[in-house]
Image: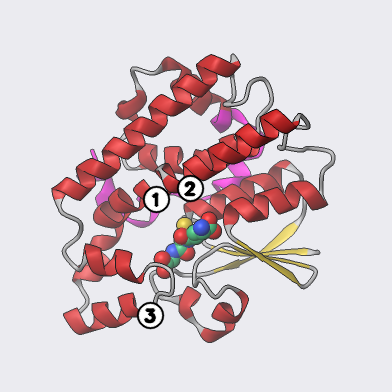
Amino acid sequence: MPFKLYNAPQSTCSQRVRFVLNAKELPFSEVKLDLLAGDQLKPDYLALNPNGVVPTLDHDGAIVIDSNVIIEYLDEVAPAPKNFTPHDPVLRAKMRSLLHFIDEMPAAAVRVPTFNLAFLPRFAAMSEDEFTAFAESKPLRKEFMLAMGRKGFPQQEMDAALGRLRRTYERMDAEVAKSGGPWLLGREISLADISVMPAIVRMADLGQDGAWQDLPRVQRWYDAIRAHPAFASTYYPGSLLTERFPHLRKSAA
Ligand SMILES: N[C@@H](CCC(=O)N[C@@H](CS)C(=O)NCC(=O)O)C(=O)O
Protein backbone atom coordinates (compact mmCIF):
# COMPACT_ATOMS: atom_id res chain seq x y z
CA MET A 1 0.00 0.00 0.00
CA PRO A 2 1.87 3.14 -1.13
CA PHE A 3 0.02 5.64 1.10
CA LYS A 4 0.55 5.74 4.84
CA LEU A 5 -1.29 8.47 6.77
CA TYR A 6 -0.16 9.57 10.19
CA ASN A 7 -3.26 11.12 11.64
CA ALA A 8 -5.81 11.24 14.43
CA PRO A 9 -9.43 10.14 14.09
CA GLN A 10 -10.86 13.39 15.51
CA SER A 11 -8.37 15.78 13.94
CA THR A 12 -10.11 18.12 11.53
CA CYS A 13 -6.97 18.46 9.38
CA SER A 14 -6.72 14.66 9.15
CA GLN A 15 -10.36 14.39 8.11
CA ARG A 16 -9.69 16.47 5.00
CA VAL A 17 -7.05 14.03 3.87
CA ARG A 18 -9.01 10.89 4.72
CA PHE A 19 -11.93 12.27 2.69
CA VAL A 20 -9.77 12.77 -0.41
CA LEU A 21 -8.10 9.35 -0.11
CA ASN A 22 -11.51 7.70 0.34
CA ALA A 23 -13.15 9.66 -2.46
CA LYS A 24 -10.34 8.66 -4.81
CA GLU A 25 -10.61 5.08 -3.56
CA LEU A 26 -6.89 5.04 -2.84
CA PRO A 27 -6.02 2.31 -0.34
CA PHE A 28 -4.05 3.65 2.60
CA SER A 29 -2.86 2.54 5.98
CA GLU A 30 -3.29 4.68 9.06
CA VAL A 31 -0.99 5.35 11.96
CA LYS A 32 -3.24 6.82 14.65
CA LEU A 33 -1.64 9.29 17.03
CA ASP A 34 -3.03 10.21 20.43
CA LEU A 35 -2.67 14.00 20.39
CA LEU A 36 -3.59 14.52 24.03
CA ALA A 37 -0.92 11.99 25.02
CA GLY A 38 1.64 13.94 22.94
CA ASP A 39 2.42 11.28 20.30
CA GLN A 40 2.90 14.11 17.78
CA LEU A 41 5.79 15.50 19.84
CA LYS A 42 7.92 12.33 19.96
CA PRO A 43 11.30 12.55 18.19
CA ASP A 44 10.47 9.89 15.57
CA TYR A 45 7.37 11.79 14.52
CA LEU A 46 9.05 15.21 14.66
CA ALA A 47 11.63 13.84 12.23
CA LEU A 48 8.76 13.38 9.74
CA ASN A 49 6.81 16.50 10.62
CA PRO A 50 8.85 19.17 12.43
CA ASN A 51 5.63 21.13 13.12
CA GLY A 52 4.55 18.41 15.56
CA VAL A 53 1.02 18.22 14.20
CA VAL A 54 -1.03 15.76 12.16
CA PRO A 55 -1.53 14.82 9.39
CA THR A 56 1.59 13.60 7.63
CA LEU A 57 1.43 11.58 4.43
CA ASP A 58 4.09 9.05 3.56
CA HIS A 59 3.79 8.24 -0.14
CA ASP A 60 6.26 5.48 -0.90
CA GLY A 61 8.81 7.23 1.31
CA ALA A 62 8.04 10.78 0.14
CA ILE A 63 6.89 12.78 3.14
CA VAL A 64 4.23 15.43 2.59
CA ILE A 65 2.92 17.62 5.41
CA ASP A 66 0.13 20.14 5.89
CA SER A 67 -3.37 18.96 5.08
CA ASN A 68 -4.20 21.46 2.32
CA VAL A 69 -0.84 20.75 0.68
CA ILE A 70 -1.46 17.00 1.00
CA ILE A 71 -4.87 17.15 -0.66
CA GLU A 72 -3.47 19.20 -3.56
CA TYR A 73 -0.60 16.71 -3.82
CA LEU A 74 -3.08 13.81 -4.01
CA ASP A 75 -4.92 15.52 -6.85
CA GLU A 76 -1.59 15.85 -8.67
CA VAL A 77 -0.30 12.30 -8.18
CA ALA A 78 -3.67 10.56 -8.49
CA PRO A 79 -5.74 12.77 -10.80
CA ALA A 80 -8.06 9.99 -11.95
CA PRO A 81 -10.76 8.76 -11.62
CA LYS A 82 -11.82 11.57 -9.27
CA ASN A 83 -10.22 14.99 -9.25
CA PHE A 84 -11.12 17.93 -7.03
CA THR A 85 -9.11 20.69 -8.73
CA PRO A 86 -10.85 22.57 -11.55
CA HIS A 87 -9.16 22.57 -14.97
CA ASP A 88 -10.02 26.21 -15.61
CA PRO A 89 -7.14 28.33 -14.23
CA VAL A 90 -9.53 31.04 -13.03
CA LEU A 91 -11.58 28.55 -11.03
CA ARG A 92 -8.39 26.90 -9.82
CA ALA A 93 -7.14 30.25 -8.55
CA LYS A 94 -10.47 30.82 -6.85
CA MET A 95 -10.24 27.44 -5.18
CA ARG A 96 -6.75 28.22 -3.91
CA SER A 97 -7.82 31.58 -2.52
CA LEU A 98 -10.66 29.81 -0.70
CA LEU A 99 -8.15 27.32 0.71
CA HIS A 100 -6.20 30.25 2.15
CA PHE A 101 -9.35 31.83 3.55
CA ILE A 102 -10.35 28.51 5.14
CA ASP A 103 -6.99 28.03 6.85
CA GLU A 104 -6.96 31.59 8.11
CA MET A 105 -10.59 31.79 9.27
CA PRO A 106 -12.58 28.65 10.19
CA ALA A 107 -9.66 26.24 10.60
CA ALA A 108 -8.01 28.59 13.09
CA ALA A 109 -11.21 29.76 14.79
CA VAL A 110 -12.56 26.27 15.38
CA ARG A 111 -9.64 25.49 17.71
CA VAL A 112 -10.98 27.88 20.32
CA PRO A 113 -14.37 26.19 20.96
CA THR A 114 -12.72 22.79 20.45
CA PHE A 115 -10.15 23.41 23.16
CA ASN A 116 -12.48 25.23 25.52
CA LEU A 117 -15.29 22.72 25.28
CA ALA A 118 -13.51 19.41 24.73
CA PHE A 119 -9.92 19.43 25.91
CA LEU A 120 -10.05 21.68 28.94
CA PRO A 121 -10.90 19.04 31.55
CA ARG A 122 -7.76 17.18 30.45
CA PHE A 123 -5.55 20.29 30.85
CA ALA A 124 -7.25 21.38 34.08
CA ALA A 125 -6.18 18.03 35.57
CA MET A 126 -2.49 18.89 34.94
CA SER A 127 -0.36 20.89 37.35
CA GLU A 128 0.67 24.36 36.17
CA ASP A 129 4.22 23.09 35.58
CA GLU A 130 3.06 20.05 33.64
CA PHE A 131 0.83 22.22 31.48
CA THR A 132 3.56 24.75 30.78
CA ALA A 133 6.01 21.99 29.83
CA PHE A 134 3.40 20.44 27.51
CA ALA A 135 2.69 23.81 25.89
CA GLU A 136 6.39 24.67 25.56
CA SER A 137 7.06 21.40 23.73
CA LYS A 138 4.73 22.26 20.84
CA PRO A 139 6.64 23.69 17.87
CA LEU A 140 3.60 25.21 16.15
CA ARG A 141 1.05 25.78 18.90
CA LYS A 142 3.13 26.84 21.92
CA GLU A 143 1.78 30.41 22.05
CA PHE A 144 -1.78 29.25 21.36
CA MET A 145 -1.61 26.85 24.30
CA LEU A 146 -0.02 29.40 26.63
CA ALA A 147 -2.64 32.00 25.66
CA MET A 148 -5.37 29.49 26.46
CA GLY A 149 -3.84 28.37 29.76
CA ARG A 150 -5.28 25.63 31.94
CA LYS A 151 -8.50 27.58 32.48
CA GLY A 152 -9.37 28.09 28.83
CA PHE A 153 -9.92 31.10 26.62
CA PRO A 154 -12.02 33.91 28.09
CA GLN A 155 -15.55 34.47 26.81
CA GLN A 156 -14.34 37.36 24.66
CA GLU A 157 -12.07 34.98 22.71
CA MET A 158 -14.86 32.43 22.37
CA ASP A 159 -17.21 35.10 21.03
CA ALA A 160 -14.56 36.30 18.58
CA ALA A 161 -14.00 32.72 17.31
CA LEU A 162 -17.74 32.13 16.94
CA GLY A 163 -17.97 35.45 15.07
CA ARG A 164 -15.25 34.35 12.66
CA LEU A 165 -17.07 31.07 12.12
CA ARG A 166 -20.31 32.92 11.47
CA ARG A 167 -18.52 35.03 8.84
CA THR A 168 -17.35 31.76 7.28
CA TYR A 169 -20.93 30.45 6.96
CA GLU A 170 -21.90 33.77 5.38
CA ARG A 171 -18.97 33.58 2.95
CA MET A 172 -19.96 30.02 2.03
CA ASP A 173 -23.53 31.17 1.47
CA ALA A 174 -22.30 33.97 -0.80
CA GLU A 175 -20.00 31.62 -2.76
CA VAL A 176 -22.77 29.07 -3.33
CA ALA A 177 -25.14 31.87 -4.39
CA LYS A 178 -22.56 33.19 -6.89
CA SER A 179 -21.57 29.80 -8.29
CA GLY A 180 -25.11 28.42 -8.45
CA GLY A 181 -24.12 25.53 -6.16
CA PRO A 182 -24.55 23.02 -4.84
CA TRP A 183 -20.81 23.34 -4.07
CA LEU A 184 -18.71 26.40 -3.37
CA LEU A 185 -17.40 26.57 -6.94
CA GLY A 186 -20.54 25.34 -8.66
CA ARG A 187 -21.58 21.94 -9.91
CA GLU A 188 -18.40 20.06 -9.03
CA ILE A 189 -17.14 19.44 -5.53
CA SER A 190 -13.63 20.85 -5.12
CA LEU A 191 -10.83 20.81 -2.56
CA ALA A 192 -12.33 23.99 -1.08
CA ASP A 193 -15.47 22.09 -0.02
CA ILE A 194 -13.37 19.28 1.40
CA SER A 195 -11.11 21.70 3.23
CA VAL A 196 -13.92 23.55 5.01
CA MET A 197 -15.95 20.39 5.74
CA PRO A 198 -14.27 19.39 9.03
CA ALA A 199 -14.80 22.80 10.66
CA ILE A 200 -18.50 22.65 9.83
CA VAL A 201 -18.84 19.06 11.03
CA ARG A 202 -16.94 20.01 14.22
CA MET A 203 -19.30 22.88 14.96
CA ALA A 204 -22.31 20.60 14.42
CA ASP A 205 -20.67 18.04 16.73
CA LEU A 206 -20.31 20.79 19.35
CA GLY A 207 -24.04 21.48 19.08
CA GLN A 208 -23.57 24.74 17.14
CA ASP A 209 -25.37 23.84 13.89
CA GLY A 210 -28.11 26.34 14.75
CA ALA A 211 -25.63 29.04 13.72
CA TRP A 212 -26.33 28.48 9.99
CA GLN A 213 -30.04 27.60 10.17
CA ASP A 214 -30.92 30.94 8.57
CA LEU A 215 -28.63 30.15 5.60
CA PRO A 216 -30.45 27.41 3.64
CA ARG A 217 -27.69 27.28 0.99
CA VAL A 218 -25.20 26.31 3.71
CA GLN A 219 -27.63 23.77 5.14
CA ARG A 220 -28.04 22.22 1.67
CA TRP A 221 -24.24 22.22 1.22
CA TYR A 222 -23.89 20.46 4.58
CA ASP A 223 -26.51 17.85 3.62
CA ALA A 224 -24.74 17.30 0.28
CA ILE A 225 -21.31 16.71 1.79
CA ARG A 226 -22.71 14.33 4.39
CA ALA A 227 -24.37 12.40 1.55
CA HIS A 228 -21.08 12.13 -0.39
CA PRO A 229 -19.91 8.48 -0.67
CA ALA A 230 -16.58 9.33 1.03
CA PHE A 231 -18.15 10.88 4.11
CA ALA A 232 -19.05 7.77 6.13
CA SER A 233 -15.65 6.11 5.69
CA THR A 234 -13.91 9.37 6.64
CA TYR A 235 -15.97 9.81 9.81
CA TYR A 236 -15.57 6.23 10.97
CA PRO A 237 -16.58 5.47 14.58
CA GLY A 238 -14.46 7.52 16.96
CA SER A 239 -14.08 10.52 14.62
CA LEU A 240 -16.43 12.84 16.49
CA LEU A 241 -15.46 14.63 19.69
CA THR A 242 -18.76 13.77 21.35
CA GLU A 243 -17.83 10.09 21.04
CA ARG A 244 -14.65 10.59 23.04
CA PHE A 245 -15.84 13.32 25.41
CA PRO A 246 -19.38 12.52 26.53
CA HIS A 247 -19.41 15.66 28.74
CA LEU A 248 -19.72 17.68 25.51
CA ARG A 249 -23.22 16.47 24.85
CA LYS A 250 -24.34 18.46 27.89
CA SER A 251 -22.01 21.47 27.86
CA ALA A 252 -22.33 22.31 24.16
CA ALA A 253 -26.09 22.06 24.06
N1 LIG B 1 -1.74 23.55 8.93
C1 LIG B 1 -1.66 22.24 9.50
C2 LIG B 1 -2.25 22.25 10.89
C3 LIG B 1 -2.25 20.88 11.51
C4 LIG B 1 -2.86 20.88 12.90
O1 LIG B 1 -3.08 21.90 13.54
N2 LIG B 1 -3.15 19.66 13.38
C5 LIG B 1 -3.75 19.51 14.69
C6 LIG B 1 -4.92 18.58 14.64
S1 LIG B 1 -6.18 19.17 13.52
C7 LIG B 1 -2.72 18.88 15.62
O2 LIG B 1 -1.99 18.00 15.23
N3 LIG B 1 -2.67 19.35 16.87
C8 LIG B 1 -1.78 18.81 17.84
C9 LIG B 1 -1.14 19.86 18.70
O3 LIG B 1 -1.53 21.02 18.60
O4 LIG B 1 -0.26 19.50 19.47
C10 LIG B 1 -2.38 21.24 8.59
O5 LIG B 1 -3.39 21.63 8.01
O6 LIG B 1 -1.94 20.10 8.47
Frontmost residue, 142 versus 39: 142
Circles 3, 1 touching at the beta carbon (< 8 Å): no
Pair 3/2: label in front: 2
Q: Quadrant of the N terminus?
A: bottom right
Secondary structure of residue under mark 2: helix
Mark 2 residue crowding within 10 angstroms, few (<14) / some (14–19) / many (20+): some
* Mark positioned earlier in the residue sequence (2 or 1): 2
Q: Which residue is mark 2?
A: 103
Q: Is mark 3 within 8 Å of ligand 1?
A: no
Secondary structure of residue under mark 1: helix
The x and y percentages for residue 162 are: 28, 39
Residue at x 35%, y 53% (from the top left corner): 111
Task: Give the answer, above or below, for where 158 lies relative to 83.
Answer: below
Q: Is residue 197 left or right of residue 27?
A: left
Residue at x 50%, y 67% (from the top left corner): 53
Q: How is the image coloured?
A: secondary structure
Residue at x 61%, y 32% (from the top left corner): 94
Q: Mark yes or no: residue 194 visible.
A: no
Q: Which residue is mark 3?
A: 137
Three-letter code, disc 3: Ser
Image: magenta residue range: 225-253
Q: Is mark 2 within 8 Å of ligand 1?
A: yes
Magenta span contains residue 245: yes
The tag on residue 108 is 1
Three-letter code, disc 2: Asp
Circles 2, 1 touching at the beta carbon (< 8 Å): yes
Secondary structure of residue under mark 3: loop
The quarter holding residue 127 reads bottom left
